Amino acid sequence: MIFPEICPKVCYICGREFGSQSISIHEPQCLEKWHTENNQLPRHLRRVEPRKPEVLTDTDKLCPLLGSFTNKFQITHKLFKVQNRCIYS
């Protein structure tokens, strides 16, 4: 049996790729490391804490983002292709 390639999840803090199980372990540790490094910077160089991006799943929210796609079937099909690109490409 051939298993499809697993889509990696990207850490929103450091940008590294992880599996779906390990990303939930990595992100809190990465954020803690980010705070430690950021607090060592001079005050004028410190950055705002990175926020985890919102994942859009509702097609009504995505309509403006997808341009000319107005039919929900087309939008759903497009999302399916994008989400599964690592399996089918």
Image (cartoon, rainbow, N blue to C red):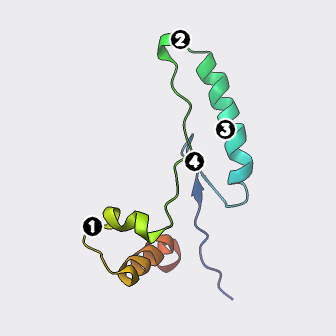
Task: Measure the alpha-carbon separation of dots 1 and 3.
Answer: 35 Å
Q: What residue type is labelled 4?
A: Arg
Q: Which amino acid does label 2 sit on?
A: Arg
- In this view, the mark in front (1 or 3): 1
Quadrant position of the N terminus in the picture: bottom right
Relative vertical location of residue 69 with respect to residue 33 in this rendering, above or below = below
Secondary structure under the numbered disc 4 in the rendered image: loop
Residue reaching furthest left? 68
Depth check: 81 or 86 in front? 81
Q: What residue type is labelled 1?
A: Gly
- In this view, the mark in front (4 or 2): 2
For disc 1, the neighbor class at 10 Å (few under 14, some 14 to 19, many from 20) is few
Relative vertical location of residue 54 with respect to residue 67 in this rendering, above or below = above
- In this view, the mark in front (4 or 1): 1
Depth check: 61 or 1 in front? 61
Q: Residue at x 49, y 61 (%)?
A: 56
Secondary structure under the numbered disc 1 in the rendered image: loop
Task: Identify the mark nearer the N-term, 2 or 1.
Answer: 2
For disc 2, the neighbor class at 10 Å (few under 14, some 14 to 19, many from 20) is few
- Which residue is label 3 attached to? 30
Residue 89 visible in the snapshot: no
Q: Give the side of residue 67 with respect to residue 88, left or right.
A: left
- Which residue is label 1 attached to? 67
Residue 14 position within the rendered picture, expressed as x and y whole percent measured from the top left: 56, 40
- Which residue is label 2 attached to? 43
- Which residue is label 4 attached to? 16
**Which dot marks residue 37?**
none
Task: Identify the mark nearer the N-term, 4 or 1.
Answer: 4
Task: Identify the mark nearer the N-term, 4 or 3.
Answer: 4
